[in-house]
Image (cartoon, grey):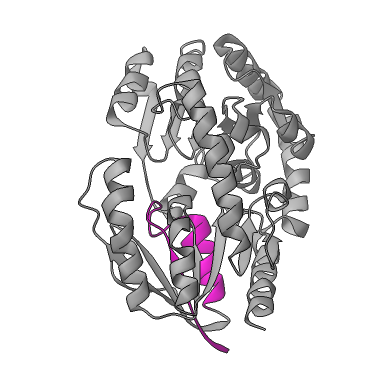
Amino acid sequence: MAKKSICHVTSVHNWDDIRIFKKQCVSLAKYFDKVHLVAPNGPNGTFNGVNVTCVENKYKGRIKRILYFRKQIINAALKLDADIYQFHDPELLSFVSYFKRKGKIVIYDSHEDVPETILTKKWIPSKMIRKVISSIFDRFEKRIVRNCDGLISVLPEITNKFTCKHTETIYNYPIIQETKKNRAKSVTRLIYVGGLTRIRGIKDICEALNHLDSGYELMLVGKWESEEFRNECHQVVKDSGRLLDKGLVDFETCQTYLETADIGLAMLHKVPNYMNSLPIKAYEYAINQLPTLMSDIPYWEKEFKNFAVFTDPLNHQLIAENIRSIKANYQDHLSNVLSFREKIIAGKNWSIEEQKLVVFYRKIIG
């Protein structure tokens, strides 16, 4: 086991975030002497070999978080005096030079194409301002990453944007585990797992539910973008008993919900940051043997060809028609899912990405 201490740092994500904690931190703890995680609002202790330090975020809103809370996260991380720090949030990039001056190895994990994401942020008042901020951040991010010791991202299209001494694409492929069937017989259960936001099409799939008869129900699992949006979606569904709102749950509980479902949904809007993306939920649906309906995004149609059905995420009637078609031809779709599932087990799973991550760290350590 390598005698180096590693600290993953996030001021935004939950401490038990699947990519950060469940995959990367737990994997690294198998190979390195000490692995720490500093995150907001959670327990303190050792979980699966990872030493977790959580800092209470008393501030409401993203502005106060950036102005005040991220410094508290950084101070907690520095107290651990690790050899290697991996930052998971773009708002932490401004501390890279500070950590480098202290002799630390710094890795940046770009979970998404942030400049493209900025273009979708409706809380920024106008498209013109969003474009300006996106352009400024793009230059800032690339300049800071050049000073990092390593860069990780989820897609080669993102990795290739940067210049850094060490780079690696660590796909967000699923953890393979045993699954079991526990599906209801009297009703067809649709499921969506992930962030419950407007641009992820949550209101649209609620609207589509109204075009389906009482033999269908919709389960939503994830964190809502706001209580206002949550209420808006609930009000859309005419028969409230058909909407099963589970909110944010842990990985194991989410798995039990997937085992009860019949059809997976991923109706994300065709906004810039989703046009080049690989939604982890699609792989999770496949592992759980769920025929899946997805947005007709070209990048997705290429990756998930012969596995999923694709449709316009804004056409509620068409979403409903495709759901009915999947149900009517369920065994044919299930056969396609099982074929894709075998490909995941053979080469598109976390155990392979884990080894890439460990090799990447060892190269940086030298």
Write the residue at 52% across / 31% down: 132
In the displayed structure, does residue 245 sit left or right of residue 359? Answer: left
Q: Position of residue 286 (x, y in %)?
A: 66, 44
Determine which quarter of the picture holds residue 348: bottom right
Write the residue at 71% across / 65% down: 352
Q: Where is residue 332 in the image (x, y as percent from the top left)?
A: 76, 30
In the displayed structure, does residue 76 sit left or right of residue 256? Answer: left
Q: Give whichever of 117, 290 is nearer the camera.
A: 117
Q: Is residue 53 visible?
A: no
Q: Can residue 9 be seen in this view?
A: yes
Q: Position of residue 115 (x, y in %)?
A: 56, 39
Q: Does the magenta stretch include residue 22?
A: yes
The quadrant of the rendering that contains the C terminus is: bottom right
Write the residue at 78% across / 51% down: 343
Q: Is residue 260 magenta?
A: no
Q: Is residue 135 above or below residue 5?
A: above
Q: Where is residue 227 in the image (x, y as percent from the top left)?
A: 28, 30
The quadrant of the rendering that contains the N terminus is: bottom right
Q: Is residue 15 above or below residue 300?
A: below
Determine which quarter of the picture holds residue 75: bottom left
Q: Give the range drawn in magenta.
A: 1-29
In the displayed structure, does residue 347 sit left or right of residue 327? Answer: right
Q: In this view, does 127 lie above or below 160?
A: above
Q: Give whichever of 32, 185 is nearer the camera.
A: 32
Write the residue at 54% across / 83% down: 32
**Total numbered labels:** 0
Q: In this view, does 61 lie above or below 203?
A: below
